[in-house]
Image (cartoon, grey):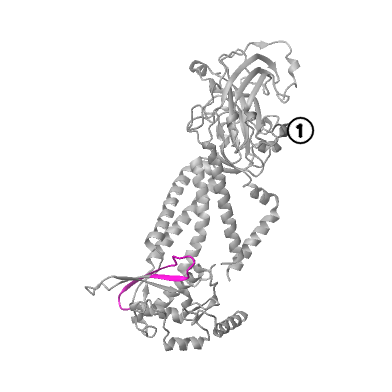
Amino acid sequence: MAVSQERITVYNLADLKNTSDDAIPNYLNSLKFTQSHRLTDVRLSLGFSAFTLAAACFLWDYKFGFESTKLYTGVAVTIYTLLNGLLTYWIFYVEKGTIYEGTAPSGEKIKISTSTPKKTVPEYHLSIEIEPPKKAKGGKKESFVIIRPFTEWFDAAGHFVVAPFQGMLAQSISVVGKADPKRAAPPAGAVDQPPVYSPEMLAALADAQVSVVGSAAETATTGSDAAKKAAAKRRKA
Amino acid sequence: MFSSIGNPRQAAAQLMNFGLILSTAFMMWKGLSIITDSPSPIVVVLSGSMEPAFQRGDLLLLWNRNIQAETSVGEVVVYNVKDKDIPIVHRIVRKFGTGPNAKLLTKGDNNLSDDTELYAKGQDFLVRKDIIGSVVGFIPYVGYITIMLSEHPWLKTVMLGIMGLMVVLQRE
Amino acid sequence: MYSSLVRLQNTFGFFTTVIFVVAALIASTDFITPRAPVVSTLKTNSVQVVRGRPHYYSSKKEEYAVIKFSLEADLSSLFTWNTKQVFVYVTAEWPHTPSAIAAGNVTENQAVIWDQIITAPSSDHLANLGPAAMKKLRKSAAGKSIDPSRGKLIIKNQKPKYQITHPSSKIAETDNVVLKLHYNVQPWVGLLTWNQETDFFKWKKLKNGLSKKFALPAIKTKKTEGQKGSSK
């Protein structure tokens, strides 16, 4: 699973963000983090109850006509507006781009929200909140921001490359590093430095026969051509 | 679009987003219905009987509440004739009496005679409850697309085809 | 996602937004344009009540009134760049039931006796006219996109377009009848507006829109059959 099968358009910021967002829960859950679905579940129940209400309103309107169901329709429209308002509130003020909420094997609670605030700059902004386990007294809530270019883990053809992405997380977030010491090999705290690839990672990349176009290698290389060929092969298959 | 079927919550969220687009459109329409008290607050003009004011394809916004005054002569109303489904947009030219049982006669500005012949058998006048709204707002041409779709059914097929093609193309 | 189709979609979406915003702006200019319609004359010239068939398709004989009238009015301020047409109509209004007569409720019965579509030059081509009349109409406003002079009405001893009746078939010897001038401004886009009873910001109420009260006479007996088919 070093390189994703799917290819995205690298010019589409939303695609870059969504693909990266999807990779975070996969990675953390594979490290035995327990994911909490509280935010998503509330959003889904708000959304689906609104939808169900609208469907019911559609049915009674279709069956009994407008005049005789006016009162119910009025009430339904009001409740629907409220539910939708709540949903919007939930998405913008409670979820705030949160894509992962869970507990690390070591007991810390972690919350990751992501955004791409600049429309023309392909940078991934991660806000991370870490809350120490309840039993550990004196522990402080920690929160920080990581800003990285997407080019670190997407190749020129639009393939998502897993190793540098997971490395980025493991090196920047102590809790993740603790759970995955292999990826966290370079010392954590290199948040604002250009990425450094560990020998293991480079080996993994070599195995995968793809190059990584990172901030250190902006120009296309023969390696990326190889990646294209590989991609073409996959598509033929 | 549904590339992440593997994750049930994500699939549910995508389904929800799609459903909410439909239901919000429907509920906005119903909300407008409730505010205007009209079962069909926006109608498309289908005939030329009100020309040159309204032409085929123009969009009319209706209001069906009597807050300040009763619906009276001079108002352009949309009404339904008993047992006929096609709503008609004409002007009230006579009103006899007051209240919900006032007798109303309508006529198209561009027609020579009044609507007596359009009404149901034995019906000489309309009453207030036959009316589904008075015209208050006007947007030209926008409704023509619905006329085209109903008159040329093949256009519907073409549009559905294009939409289908878009969904398929967007999966890449 | 970032394909030509999506771009096409976005362009179309933006295009519609722009169109609707521009339309809303145009519609809102109606409110900043002053209106001051005035009627200088609205009076009856002759009033008759006849018993007969008011329409060619009338199934029964009934009483109907023929009201000839004169009208002078200046509605020129209603013509702006967003005016498509002004529909001018004169109604006869009268009370019929004893309670309405006692309360002086003139608006109990209303019937249009005459109407006229006045197109703005921008919508002349839509008018339902013969070729000769159309040519004359278009010539009258050649080179103009707005022609306020069309709002100046001088009509003398006008025969009514519609004979007024009542569902009870009785209309003779009715007191307290008035004529009232109304107008309906039809915009190219926006809100339809009618004559107002009160001032509304820059729009003044229609001055002098009512005639003096008059009475409908008793039935004129001669020539009852001669009216048959004379009107539509």
Quarter residue B117 falls in: top right
Quarter residue C173 falls in: top right
Describe residue A89's horizontal placement relative to residue A206 as left or right. Answer: left
Q: Where is residue A225 in the image (x, y as percent from the top left)?
A: 58, 83
Q: In which quarter of the image is the C terminus of chain B?
A: bottom right
Residue ID at (50%, 53%): B24
Residue ID at (51%, 31%): C203
The residue that label 1 is drawn on is C130
Q: Does the magenta stretch include residue B156?
A: no
Q: In which quarter of the image is the N terminus of chain B?
A: bottom right
Q: Position of residue C15 (x, y in %)?
A: 59, 54
Q: Where is residue B126 in the image (x, y as percent from the top left)?
A: 60, 31
Q: Residue furthest left?
A: A137
Magenta range is A105-126
Q: Callout 1 environment at 10 Å: few (<14), some (14 to 19), or many (20+)? A: few
Is B137 rendered above or below residue A11? above
Describe residue A172's horizontal placement relative to residue B3 as left or right. Answer: left
The amino acid at mark 1 is Gly
Residue ID at (70%, 56%): B154
Q: Can residue B118 be seen in this view?
A: yes
Q: Position of residue C81 (x, y in %)?
A: 60, 38
Numbered disc 1: secondary structure: loop
Q: Is residue C129 visible?
A: no
